[in-house]
Image (cartoon, rainbow, N blue to C red):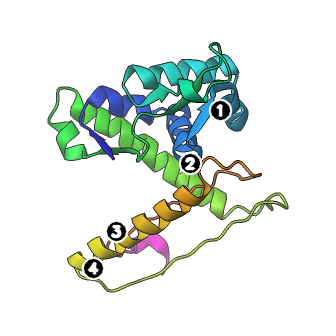
Amino acid sequence: MARYDDPRILRAIAHPVRNRILSELYAVGSLRAADIARELDVPANQASFHLRQLAKYGLVEEAPEEARDRRDRVWRLADPSGISFRTKDVETQPGGKAAVGVFRRQARAWGHRLVESAYAEEPLPEDQNRTISDWSLRLTREEVDELSGELDRLVQSWRDRTQGDGGGRTTYSLFAVLQPYPEVPEDSGT
């Protein structure tokens, strides 16, 4: 997995459309700008613009061997295993604290959106499904690392199985948080 510490890159991926493009490429493997535009329901020129921005920072690259002809542009992640940041490393760079702040605000907003969507009362289309799980475990620090590694390997095995095979698949978001049990706010009425 490629690890970055450049605040400009963190700001670039904090943009919701760019983040979603990276998510689609991670799930599917490679896509044309027109395919991305259709998946994200954005104009093709907007998808192309964001792909070029991601390419400028070395996050995506063209996959010419997958193109139908010389005009066809197919895109993939520069590192197929994904993108990683250590926010502590980014914060030491000039402009890093501000970039981490922007990224965290966007990530929080996305996390809220995922939870709101999961608990929405609107039914999903017939060909889609949703599952919500909430567990509590007692773990040591070492067990947390072990469980996290097991979850990563499990999700990676599913990604390997399904990547590149359109087959009527929909991109799903799996949002997992493994953290100490948060305190219940005093004003929560419990």
Image position of 106 (left or right of 93): right
Q: Residues within 10 Å of mark 1 (few under 14, many from 20)?
A: many
Calculate the distance from the C-alpha at mark 4 to the C-alpha at mark 1.
38 Å
Q: Tell me the tag on residue 27.
A: 2
Amino acid identity at mark 2: Ala
Magenta segment:
181-190
**Residue 182 visible in image:** no
Q: Quadrant of residue 145?
A: bottom left
Q: Which residue, given by chain and number where applicable, does mark 3 sit on?
A: 149
Q: Tell me the tag on residue 143.
A: 4
**Residue in the picture at 65% in, 19% down:** 72
Image position of 59 (left or right of 66): left
Q: Residues within 10 Å of mark 2 (few under 14, many from 20)?
A: many
Answer whether residue 129 is magenta in the image: no
Amino acid identity at mark 3: Gly
- Depicted 97 relative to depicted 70: above or below: below
Calculate the distance from the C-alpha at mark 2 to the C-alpha at mark 3.
19 Å
Answer whether residue 189 is magenta in the image: yes
Residue extending farthest to the left is 92
